[in-house]
Image: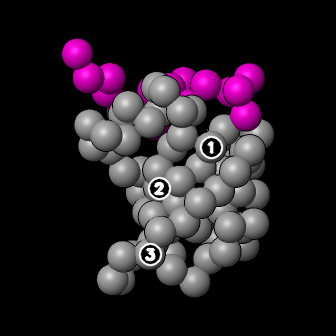
Amino acid sequence: MKTVILEKVKSTEKIVRQIEADNILVFVVDRAINKADIKKEVEELFNVKVTKVRTHTLKNKKLAYVKLNAEYPAVDVATKLGMKKNG
């Protein structure tokens, strides 16, 4: 049975800039999930390589900042997820 760790994709103006400039995607994840599990799920779901995962916990939610390997543009993954580019 597959557990879905990623609850949803965050999309704000600042996050769109991070996607374009830093190759980073931001997800809301379950607070109990660790960085290794987040990395594994992102790599499997989107067929990419993850360079680094940072997390930030806010009250009852956890944000995962997932930096993709340079050969996998985050903007391509964001487009597949239906995120729209500003401008």
Find numbered disc 1 in the image and state the secondary structure of the residue it sits on.
strand
**Residue 87 horizontal side relative to residue 41, left or right:** left
Find numbered disc 3 in the image and state the secondary structure of the residue it sits on.
strand
Q: Which corner quadrant of the image does residue 14 belong to? A: top left
Task: Give residue 25's position: percent from left, percent from top.
Answer: 51, 43
Task: Give residue 64's position: percent from left, percent from top.
Answer: 52, 60
Q: Is residue 81 magenta?
A: yes
Magenta segment, which residues?
69-87
Residue 80 seen in the figure:
no
Q: Earlier in the sequence, mark 1 or mark 2?
A: 2
Q: CA distance from mark 1 to mark 3?
A: 17 Å
Q: Which residue is mark 2?
A: 27
* Front one among 69 and 7: 69
Amino acid type at circle 1 is Lys
* Residue at 54% in and 66% down: 55
Crowdedness of circle 2 by 10 Å Cα count: few (<14), some, many (20+)? Answer: many
Q: Which mark is residue 67?
A: 1
* Residue at 35% in and 83% down: 60
* Residue at 46% in and 25% down: 20
